[in-house]
Amino acid sequence: MSLQNYAENGAFAPGKIAATLRTTVEELARSLGLGKDAIQRKDRIASDRTQRRIRQMVEVLNKVEPRFGSSLLAYAWYRSEPLPGFSGRTAMDLVQDNRADDVLTYIDAVDAGIHA
């Protein structure tokens, strides 16, 4: 998921991301912990909160996509796989709580062989 492929006019375009992940913008909003207005109304799409949350999800997906072989499988992992050490919470849960850095640190630790 190359970042520049999902931007329009200098901002992330939720419709492009949803199409790539073969989901709806409403489902994408739920995955981000945002209301559907946040990714459907132009003024809300451009908000710092919406753009930050989208960027965080895309960064996580970019980080794990090589190990799964596709953005669809990376998105399935993001939404459903509980991460050890986070009380059964998924990457999606953590991103929704503004803890994307914790997810990225965890992925780096797994890649370094610290977590298995």
Image (cartoon, grey):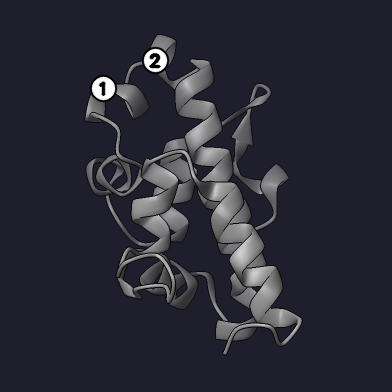
Asked whether 71 or 108 is in front, the reply is 108
Asked whether 112 or 35 is in front, the reply is 112
Q: Residues within 10 Å of mark 1 (few under 14, many from 20)?
A: some
Q: Is residue 13 visible?
A: no
Residue 44's mark? Answer: 2
Label 2 close to label 1 by CB (< 8 Å):
yes
The residue at 26%/22% (across/down) is 37
Tell me the quarter of the image containing the N terminus.
bottom right
What's the distance in space between the residues labelled 2 and 1, CA to CA? 7 Å
Q: Is residue 61 above or below residue 80?
A: above
Q: Is residue 32 visible?
A: yes
Please name the amino acid that badge 2 sits on. Arg
The residue at 57%/90% (across/down) is 116
Question: Measured from the top left, where is residue 106 in percent x and y?
Answer: 60, 67
Name the image quarter holding residue 42: top left
Residue bearing the label numbered 1: 37
- On screen, residue 55 versus residue 29, left or right, reads right
The residue at 55%/31% (across/down) is 52
